[in-house]
Amino acid sequence: MTTVDTVEQADTAPRVRGRRSGVASGRIRTVGMYLISIAIGVGIWQLVAMQYGSALVASPAQTITAAKELASDGTLLNSVIASSRRILIGWGLGLVVGVPVGLLMGRLTVIRQLLDPYIEFFRFIPPVAFVTLAVVWLGIGESSKVVLIFYTSVFIVTLNTIAGVLSVNESKLRAATSLGANRWQVMRSVVLPATVPHIITGARLAMGNSFLTIVSAEIVAAQVGLGALIWTSRNYGRIDWVFVGIITLGILGFVFDRVLRVVSTRVLRRYGVKL
């Protein structure tokens, strides 16, 4: 090993350690800010509960006690599992259908002109408007809830995918074609990588809307689920149970979105998208 190599390694090592130290301190700072934010939120929540009383606003301590009560007999866990299953199945189906349809509509003008009127019509009708029809047509089983979640997700994913396809630089498409790429190769090598960020954005938005829909669907046609838990709690006058259901929905959505962000980061890196 030469003297130059030794000097270069000596210079590189401190930079690597400094970079790692900076990343670690950044993560610690982020966690610290999260904890401070949560502490402030809980403090405000406690003040509001003290102001209005337990009949209107359950305090943090009452909510924790109610959560333990619901967890002890398995009600909370069963509700979380039921709602999560419905959301993931309906959302997943929305991705499976929405992405290919969006790619085709973005690339083929004829298909876009044929399907665009239906998408523009139905996407403005909220899923809650179809709750009654879903129950009448599909019953009170899992199908009605899954279909409503699918309805919520598919249009969001489709529109974001179309936007991604239409945003592809035309010069890249012409360059790939001039090099002899056929339609499938252009789609796989040029269009899809450029559309992935839009697809991921659509997936995250669809996930958020799925949580909005699941509550309405479970209130009308479910015995188990977080929406059903909130509605049942209201019937029994248990405000603390209502708070448990609402907070659990928020935590569940936060976890789902974080997992989706981690997966999305890896997918984006795979396609060479800079973060």
Image (cartoon, rainbow, N blue to C red):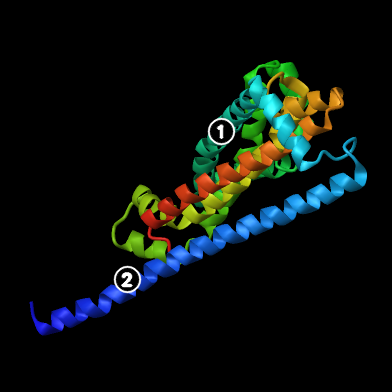
> Residue 61 sits in which quadrant?
top right
Q: Does residue 158 appear in the picture of this structure?
A: no
Instruction: Looking at the picture, tell me which residue is in the foreground, 92 or 86.
Output: 86
Give me the residue at 88% from left, 46% from top. 50
Decide: is 179 above or below 115.
below
Q: Residue 125: horizontal and vertical position, in percent? A: 76, 39
Q: Which residue is found at the position 57% from the left and 55% from the top?
A: 163
Residue type, label 2 = Val
In the image: residue 24, left or right of residue 252: left
Count neighbours of disc 2 (C-alpha within 10 A) and say few if under 14, some if 14 to 19, many if 20 or more: few
Lateral position of residue 268 relative to residue 202, left or right:
left
* Crowd tier of the residue under label 1, counting other residues whose Cα lies within 10 Å: few below 14, some 14–19, many 20 or above: some
Q: Secondary structure at mark 2?
A: helix
189, 215: nearer the viewer: 215
Residue highlighted by disc 1:
88
Sequence-earlier tag: 2 or 1:
2
Q: Nearer the viewer, residue 164 or 44?
A: 44
**C-alpha separation, residue under disc 2 versus residue under disc 1:** 40 Å
Res 33 quadrant in image: bottom right
Which residue has dot 2 on it? Answer: 16
Q: Amino acid at mark 1?
A: Leu
Front residue of 119 and 195: 195
The residue at 42%/55% (across/down) is 193
Q: Position of residue 48 (x, y in %)?
A: 86, 49
Residue 237: x %, y % from top left: 87, 26
- Residue 4 vs 152, above or below: the answer is below
Task: Give the foreground label among 2 and 1.
Answer: 2
Q: Secondary structure at mark 1?
A: helix
